[in-house]
Amino acid sequence: MLADGTRVQLLANIGGAKDAEKAAAANADGVGLFRTEFLFLDREDEPGVEEQTAAYAETFAHLPGKKVVVRTIDAGADKPLPFLTNADEPNPALGVRAYRTSWEKRSVLTNQLDAIAAAAAQSEAKPWVMAPMIATVPETEDFVALCRERGLEPAGIMVETPAAAITADRHLTACDFASIGTNDLTQYTMAADRQLGSLAHLNNPWQPSVLSLVKATCDGARTAGGDPDAFGESANKPVGVCGEAAGDPGLAVVLVGLGVNSLSMTPRSLPAVAKVLSTVTLEQAQQLARKAVAARTAEDAVSAVRADLPILGELGL
Ligand code: PEP
Ligand code: MG
């Protein structure tokens, strides 16, 4: 909650049932990113629908009545998966990864959606389902259709490519919500492999170009509009952030100022983010967001925000 009463959902990133327990203990408003691929990694074969259903249901059971954003399998690049991804692509981060694997191996995605729907039917959690690495609007339409066929609603996308951010209005007309994966969005905006330590200065979500794409996504959500009562959230299609950026308290203020209405992070980061957000009004956050987007460099953006947010220094952040 901001100082003026504006609500921002503070959510947790999880990988399975144990993390879901921690998210509930940390009093998160729900889960903004359930990384389901942890169930698939180090496996020779795809886990069966029943095994997946049991794993998702066990996770959901810790979060009755809560929003749980489930990301469908995000294999490839930094998350290789022998039965699904191609080991000899020259540029795996730009290859057939994440949602793209469903073009050739459709059943892995449809089996997973079947399992999520079955687990949802057995639980009181509210699964929101989203696909990673979406670039084009037909991809969004395809994924939403698969979700609708199974009664999975809301259905959304991760904004991880500049393509999706720039055309967010059309993506958000076709789907119910978006969650910005700033880790990948930064990698693809800056053309800098997120796994290379030597490029860490480029892989920085404070880069004004990355913030401009967050703004483009939020502006697109406003253009797409939406039903004020849909999913109990806002007049616009909900836009969250679930990359590391959401857990940086100063950047969290900027993201909210840009129009993001939920932030999802490791549960450890929740208290500091909540504390800093509670000291600013929406108008102040919007002012800081304007300064950060207009900054010349990432470092200038950080300095401008820190100068106006002395609470960060006071809290030793
Ligand atoms: C992201 O890219 O920001 C994200 C949340 O997904 P992952 O880090 O799992 O790729
Ligand atoms: Mg990602």
Image (cartoon, rainbow, N blue to C red):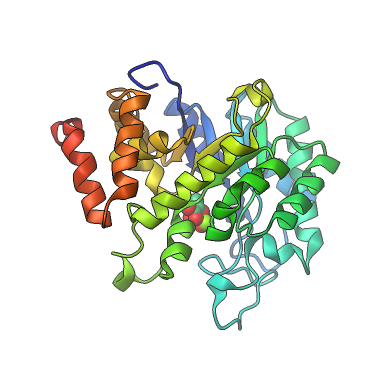
Does residue 143 lie above or below 107 as drawn?
above
Q: In the image as oriented, which residue stretches furthest toward the top?
A: 5
Looking at the rendered structure, the number of numbered marks drawn on it comes to 0
Does residue 182 lie above or below 314 as drawn?
below
Towards the viewer: 81 or 310: 310
In the image: residue 186, left or right of residue 123: left
Q: Position of residue 233 (x, y in %)?
A: 59, 24
Q: Position of residue 221 (x, y in %)?
A: 58, 39
Which residue is at 61% across, 54% downward? 132
Q: Where, by quadrant of the figure, is residue 258 drawn?
A: top left
Does residue 136 lie above or below 272 as drawn?
below
Image quarter hosting the C terminus? top left
Q: Where, by quadrant of the figure, is residue 166 drawn?
A: bottom right
Q: Position of residue 59 (x, y in %)?
A: 61, 37
Which residue is at 70% across, 35% downward? 154
Tell me if I can see residue 317 in this picture: no
Q: Position of residue 158 (x, y in %)?
A: 58, 50
Image quarter hosting the N terminus? top left
Which residue is at 73% across, 42% downward? 116
In the image: residue 315, left or right of residue 287: left
Which residue is at 43% across, 20% downward? 6
